[in-house]
Every structure is written in structure tokens, then in C-alpha cells.
Image (cartoon, rainbow, N blue to C red):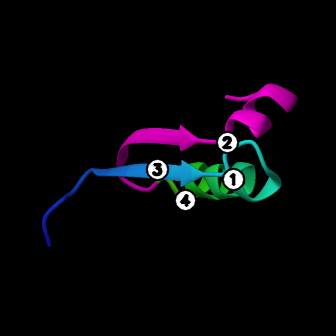
Amino acid sequence: MKNRNYKLAVVGATGLVGRTVLQVLEEKKLPISEYSFFASKRSARSRNCF
């Protein structure tokens, strides 16, 4: 099997689920070369975004 690097998009990054997904991915040390985070304008204004 070839080594692959993946690009990952996290939708809802300001919410609990988005943060938990990121934490789990970091713990698993998956071959992800690039992360993109998406949040609604309302969520981005009301919370601290990454």
C-alpha cells in the first residue's frame, strides 16, 4: 500500500464536534498534510476560531 497524504476539511470547526474531530485526528497521527476549517459567519463571530 502506498503512503498517502490527505487533505481534510472540518465543517463546524467552532463547535464541540469540530474540536473533538481535530483532537482525535491529532491523537491518531493520520497522514493528513493539510487541514481546512469551515464555520458559519455567525459561529465565527461568536466564538474563538482556530
User: In 3D space, how far apart are the residues under numbered discs 2 and 1 (Cα atoms)?
Assistant: 13 Å
Range covered by the magenta-colored residues = 30-50
**Viewer-nearest residue: 6 or 41:** 41
Rate crowding at label 4 as few (under 14), some (14 to 19) or many (20 or more) other CA atoms within 10 Å. Answer: few
Q: Nearer the viewer, mark 3 or mark 2?
A: 2
Q: Which residue is mark 1?
A: 18
Q: Is residue 33 magenta?
A: yes
Q: How many marks?
A: 4
Q: Which circle marks residue 38 in the picture? A: none
Q: Nearer the viewer, mark 2 or mark 1?
A: 2
Residue kind at label 4, given as amino acid type: Lys
Q: Which circle marks residue 9 in the picture? A: 3
Q: Earlier in the sequence, mark 4 or mark 1?
A: 1
Percent across and percent down for residue 41 are 69, 34
Q: Is there CB contact under 8 Å for labels 3 and 2?
A: no
User: In 3D space, how far apart are the residues under numbered discs 4 and 1 (Cα atoms)?
Assistant: 16 Å
Rate crowding at label 3 as few (under 14), some (14 to 19) or many (20 or more) other CA atoms within 10 Å. Answer: few
Q: Is residue 40 magenta?
A: yes
SS for callout 4 = helix
Which residue corresponds to the image point at 86% horizontal and 30% vertical from the top-left? 46
Q: Earlier in the sequence, mark 2 or mark 4?
A: 4
User: In 3D space, how far apart are the residues under numbered discs 3 and 2 (Cα atoms)?
Assistant: 14 Å
Residue kind at label 1, given as amino acid type: Gly
Q: Which residue is mark 2?
A: 40
Q: Which residue is mark 4?
A: 28
Which residue appears farthest toward the left when viewing the image?
A: 2
Image position of 37 (left or right of 8): right
